[in-house]
Amino acid sequence: DVKVTQSSRYLVKRTGEKVFLECVQDMDHENMFWYRQDPGLGLRLIYFSYDVKMKEKGDIPEGYSVSREKKERFSLILESASTNQTSMYLCASSSLAGGGYEQYFGPGTRLTVT
Amino acid sequence: DQQVKQNSPSLSVQEGRISILNCDYTNSMFDYFLWYKKYPAEGPTFLISISSIKDKNEDGRFTVFLNKSAKHLSLHIVPSQPGDSAVYFCAASEAHAGNMLTFGGGTRLMVKP
């Protein structure tokens, strides 16, 4: 079974703090993704990576950066957290094999910025 | 502008009856569609998918229908069970788009015993 793990389930940070969210997958998937989920808006793509050290902006990259130094690990960084970044953050991975459309998700990190 | 829309934020169905969840899209380049199910405090899990070359795909109690001319897909759950209560997201992808998915806003399904 594919396993995607995220470093924290719940996180509370103050405005202006630097925040790191870590994601690890154990299936040797090429692609990794970071989304945020907000009520009524579904899942919106922040960034994705198709290889080590490669990254592409998604629909809402402003205020975020990412890092992928190893194939299994994809980090999301909030350089200076703001209250409008309070959200559920979901990491996913997928393989190029067989079309690669299906993404496997981690359990999510609920981040609250006060 | 949302390219994938789920116009019903919630749906309530009696146990044993059919649940029909709907999804509309605007991008004619989408060629693969997926449904995900999400329980509270868990990540979404893949449920069923359909390629644009088909108009129906069935997996047990779950059937997805695709109407390309109307740019509409639906998920049918028969019979509905209380354990099906969750948020359902439809998602779409286009070929050569780097395996990116575009998600709808979700529909919360409540199946009453």
Image (spheres, rainbow, N blue to C red):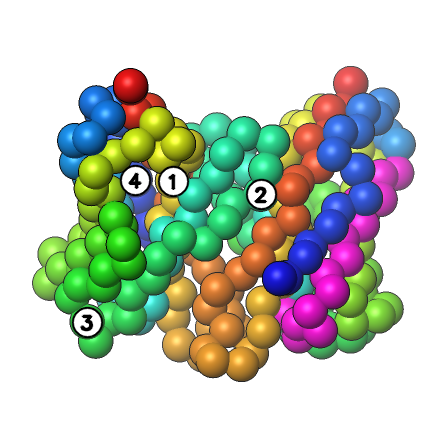
In primary-sequence order, the first of circles 3 and 4 is 4
Instruction: Point out residue B106 in the picture as x, y percentages from the top left corner.
Output: 38, 37
- B48 left or right of B53 in image: right
Q: Nearer the viewer, residue B63 or A113?
A: B63
Q: Residue at left 57%, top 58%?
A: A104
Query: In the rendered structure, which segment of residues is drawn in magenta?
Result: A18-31
- A61 left or right of B21 in image: right
The label number, if any, that marks residue B54 in the structure image: 3
Callout 4: few (<14), some (14-19), or many (20+) C-alpha neighbours within 10 Å? many
In primary-sequence order, the first of circles 4 and 2 is 4
The label number, if any, that marks residue A24 in the structure image: none
The label number, if any, that marks residue B6 in the structure image: 4
Q: Which residue is mark 1?
A: B88
Residue B2 in sight: no
- A104 left or right of B26 in image: right
Badge 4 element: loop
Q: Amino acid at mark 4?
A: Gln
Q: Nearer the viewer, residue A14 or A108?
A: A108
Query: How many circles with numbers are drawn on the protein?
Result: 4
Task: Give the foreground label among 3 and 4.
Answer: 3
Q: Residue at left 28%, top 58%?
A: B59
Task: Give the foreground label among 1 and 4.
Answer: 1
Instruction: Point out residue A42 in the picture as x, y percentages from the top left corner.
Output: 46, 40
Same chain? Circles 4 and 2: yes
Q: Which residue is mark 2?
A: B43
Alpha-carbon span between mark 2 and mark 3: 28 Å
Q: Amino acid at mark 2?
A: Gly
